[in-house]
Amino acid sequence: MMSTTAIGEYALLSDCHSAALVSREGSVDWLCFPRFDQPSVFGRILGEDAGHWSLSPVGEATFERRYLEGTMVLETTVRTASGMARITDAMSLDPDERGHDLGRGAPGMLLRQIEGVNGEVAFRSGYAPRPEYGLISPLLTPAAGGVTGRGGAEVLFLSDDGDMTIDGATATSSFTVRAGERRSFALHHRRSHEAAPTRLTPDEIDERLRGTVQAWRRWSSVHQAYEGPWSDLVYHSGCVLQALMYQPTGAIVAAPTTSLPEGVGGERNWDYRYAWVRDASFTLDALWVAACPDEANKFFSWMTGAVASGLDVDSELQIMFGIGGEHDLSERTLPHLTGWRESRPVRVGNGAWNQRQLDVYGELLDAADRLRDHLEDIDEATKRFLVRVADAAAEKWREKDQGIWEVRGEPRDFLYSKLMCWVALDRAIHLAPLIDGHDHIDKWTAVRDEIREVILRDGWSDEANAFTQVFGSPELDASNLMMPIVGFLPATDPRMRATIDAIADRLTDEHGLVYRYRVQDTDDGLEGEEGSFLLCTFWLAEALAMAGEIERARAVFERAIAFANDVGLLAEEVDEATGELLGNFPQAFSHIGLINAAWAISQAERAAPEG
């Protein structure tokens, strides 16, 4: 059977090591322990038999959800004909944390609590762990205060003081919560070679929930300094980015899920539980705006450590890494899973890890330049590495590649890739005193200027009246909205204004959201359609703000945020026909785009003359 719950019906829980998705109706349908990129324990979002844990009211009910202020702790209010109850869901954090290194003491534990508000509400619990993406049906056995599950490399313990019926690898129970009563649960994880987890009492679960709320709020209290429009969304997006950060290294996953499709029933299904170097400069800008400088520095330190090994002018800079710094992300499919709404194949790993993508040089050096005021003590090895990155961009910029969108067709001369090689050299020149690059400045300057001339000549299409995706082609690409954002051309330049207008007019869906490119016009090596791209829509808002068209920018921004779900989460794409969220969820890029576009609009409004 296939999973049918809409992607936008889910909310995110995180302990900054791993993540869970819980549906509006109270079913945890995705959870990976102990890391974001580990095999799932609950995977029903990708196949009905891949595991879940539901706490659902019996009969008809309405649901209203919110995150507790300043946290990623979810509160769901359930109303039935007989009463009202509240469910609180969280992944446990160390209550002793003081606002920095959120998730440092994460114990690998999912907490759930139901509290009766008035009347009484009958609930049904269904606990069906299926480790290794549903391949394992663990042995469930009753234990004092709960249920132990053993299977493969996992040991799970569900703390539950109620009576549960065990049928093979599934445990169920029915119970009623009345006003003033609480029912508390905790799912603990250990590796099979580690000491088995033990029961938590309801009071201990309650204490852990309070500590988790406290830890999130302490973090938020020192990371919410943005002042401008949509501050609530900016703050919340900062929390989402923090929730997607793997605390031990500082790496940020693109999304906590795999294989949620870009088109329903299609093959554009990828594993996003890794960290892309491409995301670096966008992420660092967003963390800076959201007042997260510690996280920005940690992310950059992880990134340079992961990518620095072995780079010289003749080697390629890898574009993405595992959250622990792993290089080999070989892709495979899971044929036993039907996929979300039969969108196959379900993939783990990501075959783009060894693609050639020249834009990565610019994004890495742009990230370094963003942090230049905090890199006074940069070590000699990192200095040499950043010089090699600039030299590689200078040597390779003319070569063809797969581009920012990781097309699986033939390599081409993508404008964005050339643009980011220009960025690499521009930023390297600025960084030269810091990275001991004085002897390279003349070469870097000459090549930078040459790249600019070629982009202005070969990247412009009279037929399209715009800068285009590939040299010598009329095809549009939303990534060219980055040209003013990275400082290549002012947004007010007539050629840039024409490009912005062309994208707004010819690369948008009926909702006014922006496509990355028209799949029917670009050989990306894949079949099927995809939705419009929220990040690209935020880029359009940002570019319009920089062009001084503040009202248009605001309108585009408002169109994009209208597709956030009820708890403020954004996916990667939107289905033009239905308006449903598509793609891996929630998507870091979309929340990064929101933060950066809000900042650009706020800056444009401050700079605009009064009257």
Image: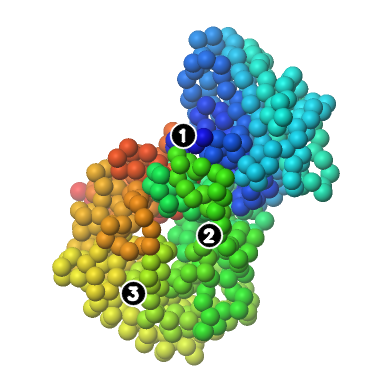
Left or right of 503 on screen, residue 58: right
The residue under label 2 is: 350
Report the side of 366 relative to 99 (left or right): left
Please tell me which residue is depicted at 26% across the width and 67% down the height of the picture: 468
Q: Distance between the residues labelled 3 and 1?
A: 40 Å
Distance from label 2 to label 3 (Cα)? 23 Å
Between circles 2 and 3, the one closer to the viewer is: 2
Name the residue tied to disc 3.
Answer: 413
Q: Give the residue at mark 1.
A: 4
Please tell me which residue is depicted at 51% across the width and 84% down the height of the picture.
313
Q: Position of residue 562 (x, y in %)?
A: 35, 39
Residue at point 72% right, 29% down? Answer: 168
Q: Which amino acid does the dot numbered 2 rest on?
A: Asn
Secondary structure category for the residue under label 3: loop
Residue 587 appears left or right of 97: left
As rendered, which of 265 and 106 lies closer to the eye?
265
Marked residue nearer the N-terminal end (2 or 1): 1
Q: Nearer the viewer, residue 505 or 517?
A: 517
**Where does the image place residue 402, in percent across and percent down from the top left?**
41, 69
Q: In which quarter of the image is residue 217?
A: top right
Q: Earlier in the sequence, mark 3 or mark 1?
A: 1
- In the rendered structure, are the residues bearing label 3 and label 1 in contact, judged by CB atoms less than 8 Å apart? no
What's the amino acid at mark 3?
Asp
